[in-house]
Structures are given as structure tokens and as C-alpha cells.
Amino acid sequence: MLNFKLDTFLSLCETRSYTRTAEYLHITQPAVTQHIKYLESYYGTKLLYYDEKKRIHLTEHGRLLRAYAQTVKADSEILKRKLASPLEKPDELKIGSLTTIGESLVPRMVARYLETFPDKKISIYLGETDDLLVQLKNGRVHFCIVDTYCPPDQFESGELFESETVCICSPRHPLAGKTVDFKDLNHYRLIFLHGNTNSHRNLRHILRENNQDVQGFSSYVEVGTMNTVRNMVIQNIGISFIYRFAVQKSLDNGSLSQIHIKNYAADTHFNFVWMKNSFFSKNSRDFLQICREYLDLHGTG
């Protein structure tokens, strides 16, 4: 079990507030202060400092301790599950993935992994990047696949692949297969995922880069899953922006078409991430290697 004082320190790293940390841990604010002072005395170094606006920051040594404590906390939870099972039972590998990848690429990569490690048990957790990294730090998954930069002082990572975001429509749409200016899209209905997803943040970034926003389109439909977006576009209800790997098969079989946009490019890097210096890093590296071998052979289509 993680030392409670280290747990207090990790909570303070997240909240950057002694008051909110005390509320979260159900202890008093003086107790939070006492825990931090004990750690600074024990390690013989300052872990935190205030800037001129009284905001809390980590020192270099504080960042080092946070990385260590996060990995210990995550590994402790994984080890707890492992020790609770009979030693002769196969290990369970818990994978975290963005929903978009989890519904398309991950099942194929898992199948390839199980060809090499047939005795492994697999559990797949789908979510958004912020949630996945929380699950990773809490030891609920061994590793995760995300579309954001992860600080190397806290995580180990490897780039898995890169994908462009393409504008798609039904083959019956007036712009199907055509090359247009971005503003020409404004005459049509935009379909997109709801606002708490990475896909929505990606869309906002694309629109902002092109001096646009969702209000500039003739209308829009906001939905909850990528499959719903794809199916609505196939039904010619509107257009959408989606990672190419998620719709490549539909583009290839003709159920979807691409709208080509002048002077437009939007590429995203997808990273494979696990806790820095984790005792269980080998599981992550094994899976990463098999993922890369699969992608080298088959790509993301």
C-alpha cells in the first residue's frame, strides 16, 4: 500500500491546493501540511514552492518524487490484483484505449498478441485521454493508447502511428470527391461527437486553425459515438471530420467519400503509454512490439 503521506503529496500535486487536498482525502488542512513537511524532512529537500501569485509549483526534486510515487501507486494496485489470484492462473493484461481506436484497431492488435501469448487474459477499457491517464496512474490499466503528449518525467511512451483527420460525406453529397475551400463547407450540416471527447477537441482545433466554428455551419448534429457519426454521414445527413483510420474501410468500399480541402492538413500522433520505471514494463513493451509489427504489415486500414 502506498504510504499515506505520499498519497497526500500526489493529491496535492493534482489539486495544487492544501484546502482541496484536505477535502478530497477527508483530513484536516494542518494534516496535509504536516505530511508535506515530513516528506521534505525525510528526503532532505524542498518539494514545493510558491510563485509571486501564491500558486503552488513542484521543484525538480518534487517532480522526481511525484514520478516515483505515481509508479509505486500504480504498480501496487496491479500487484494487489496479481497476488489475489492463484499463481497458476494466467496474468490479466488491462489495456486502456481511446474509444475510436478501441472500436477499430485494438481488437485486431489484441488478436495478434494472443497468437503469441495465448494464455493471457485481456481486459480492454475504453475512454478519453484524460480519464485513461487517471486509470493508468491508479493502476487500473497496465498501459493505454492516447492522442496526446505525455511528460517523460512521469510516463514512458512510444509512438504507435500517425493519422490525418479527413472530411467525409456520403457519395451522394454534392461535394463528394471534390476539392473545395474550407468556407464552402459552411453551407452544409456538420456532425460531430459531443464536447467531452478528444475528437471534439480535435474538431475545435481544426476549425479554429481555419477561422471557423460550429456556429458557422448551416446546422449541426452532436452525437455520442463515432459509429453514430459514421452512420449519419452514410445516410447523407451531413458531413464530418474523422480520423482516417476510423473510416478507411468505408472510403475503400465506397460507402463514404472524402471532401478534399485546399491548404488543409491535420495530423495526430497516437502514443502507447505506461508508467515510468514500472515493474510491469515488460508487459507493455511486449504489447507495443506486437502492435508495431501488426501495423508494419497491415497499416491502420
Image: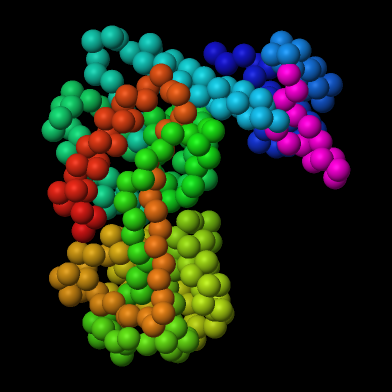
Q: For this rendering, which residue is in front, 281 or 192?
A: 281
Residue 46 falls within the magenta-colored stretch: yes
Residue 278 appears left or right of 32: left
Q: Is residue 98 visible?
A: no
- Name the quadrant containing residue 262: bottom left
Name the image quarter holding the N terminus: top right
Question: What residue is shown at x 38% (from left), y 50% (from top)?
Answer: 270
Near-viewer residue (229 or 148): 148
- Quadrant in the rendering for residue 162: bottom left
In percent of width and height, residue 144 lies at 39, 39
Q: How many marks?
A: 0
Q: Residue 183: x and y, percent? A: 47, 87
Q: Is residue 140 above or below residue 165?
A: above
Residue 285 image offset from top left, x and y in percent = 31, 31
Q: Left or right of 68: which side holds 267?
A: left
Quarter of the rendering containing residue 294: top left
Q: Residue at x 15, y 70 (%)?
A: 253
Across and down, in percent, residue 223 comes to 44, 65
Find the magenta span and give its range.
Answer: 45-58
